[in-house]
Amino acid sequence: MIVADTSAVVALLDAGDRHHRPLRELYLSNPDAWVLPGAILPEVDYLLATQLGPKARTAFLADLADGAFGVEWGRQSDIEAAALICERYADLHLGLVDGVVVATAERLGAEAIATLDLQHFGAVTIAGHPRLLPRDA
């Protein structure tokens, strides 16, 4: 299982991004392995609308509706764990979304987190030690 962060999803959908190709290959090799925490969806939606335009945003929403991505809507325990993670790494200014991504990956026992945010995810000790993709591919 690969839990996806906002940065990886946006790069996956942006053919002009320098990380698009490796993320696309990774996604296409096993699309069912990808899980998007519900907390990233507003960020992805906003970034697609403001950076790539309404066509990209509409395509992503259609993909979500068609089940192209599994969505993990989370639990209260994910929020509680995210709050502790954000507190533990206060100097990193992780924020709720990154905290929820880490908490979700830990709860689900993910083998990897798809992210380009190595400043944050590379500095956090994550239970189970998931790989950070595409860096660790």
Image: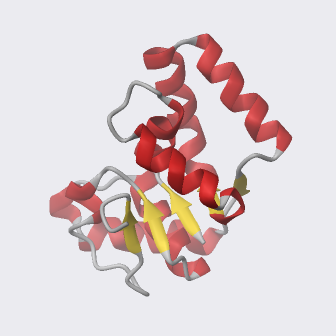
The quadrant the N terminus occupies is: bottom right
> Which residue is at the front of the view, 20 or 1?
20
**How many numbered badges does the structure rendering display?**
0
Give residue 74's quadrant in the image: bottom right
The colour style of the image is secondary structure
Q: Position of residue 75 (x, y in %)?
A: 67, 68
Q: Position of residue 120 (x, y in %)?
A: 25, 59
Q: Is residue 58 above or below residue 81?
A: above
* Left or right of 64 on screen, residue 79: left
The quadrant the C terminus occupies is: bottom left
Question: Would residue 37 be visible to someone looking at this image?
Answer: no
* Left or right of 122 on screen, residue 110: right
Question: Would residue 125 be visible to someone looking at this image?
Answer: yes
Q: Is residue 101 above or below residue 61?
A: below
Residue at x 60%, y 20% (from the top left corner): 56
Give residue 49's quadrant in the image: top right
Residue at x 47%, y 71% (from the top left corner): 112
Residue located farthest toward the left when viewing the structure as drawn: 91
Q: Is residue 96 above or below residue 87?
A: above
Residue at x 29%, y 79% (from the top left corner): 125
Residue located farthest toward the right when viewing the structure as drawn: 66
Residue at x 23%, y 54% (from the top left corner): 93
Q: Position of residue 89 (x, y in %)?
A: 23, 68
Residue located farthest toward the bottom when viewing the structure as drawn: 128
Residue located farthest toward the top when viewing the structure as drawn: 54
* Left or right of 79 on screen, residue 30: right
Q: Is residue 122 above or below residue 110?
A: above
> Which residue is at the front of the view, 81 or 56?
56
